[in-house]
Image (tube, rainbow, N blue to C red):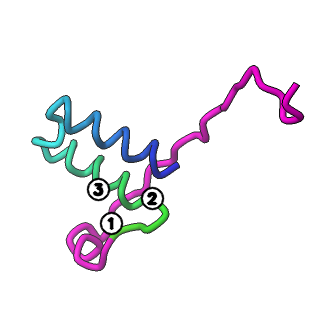
Amino acid sequence: MDFLLFKTAAQLISSKEHLTEKGLLKIVSLRASSNNGLSEKLESSFPKLPSISIEPPTITSNYRIDGN
């Protein structure tokens, strides 16, 4: 899940959305949703920040577990 959060943040930065207040809040919200959460410094800077829910990825494979 953390990778998906990171990937989403990287896409926001790539599209330069991080340069707006709304985009910055999205990125900080993504960080808050990660396993490690926010650092104390970020938490004090953004006290009422909502977390963002990410759907778990669906993994499909043509391989069987028994190797056949």
Q: Nearer the viewer, mark 3 or mark 2?
A: 2
**Residue 33 place in picture, x, y as percent:** 44, 57
Query: In the figure, residue 40 lies in which quadrant?
Result: bottom left
Amino acid type of the residue that numbered disc 3 sits on in the rendered structure: Val
Q: Label 1, on which residue?
A: 48
Q: What count of labels does the image hold?
A: 3
Q: CA distance from mark 3 to mark 2?
A: 10 Å
**Residue 18 place in picture, x, y as percent:** 17, 42
For disc 1, the neighbor class at 10 Å (few under 14, some 14 to 19, many from 20) is: few
Residue at the spot 12% in from the left edge and 42% down from the top edge: 20
Q: CA distance from mark 2 to mark 1?
A: 16 Å
Residue 57 vs 61, above or below: the answer is below
Q: Label 3, on which residue?
A: 28
Q: Is residue 22 left or right of residue 7?
A: left
Q: Earlier in the sequence, mark 3 or mark 2?
A: 3
Q: Quadrant of the C terminus?
A: top right
Q: Label 2, on which residue?
A: 34
Residue at the spot 29% in from the left edge and 47% down from the top edge: 26
Farthest-out residue, left? 19
Is residue 62 one of those drawn in magenta? yes
Local SS, label 3: helix
Magenta span of residues: 39-68
Q: Nearer the viewer, residue 66 or 60?
A: 66
Amino acid type of the residue that numbered disc 1 sits on in the rendered structure: Lys
Residue at the spot 29% in from the left edge and 73% down from the top edge: 43
Amino acid type of the residue that numbered disc 2 sits on in the rendered structure: Ser
- Asked if marks 2 and 1 touch (Cβ < 8 Å), the reply is no
Local SS, label 1: loop
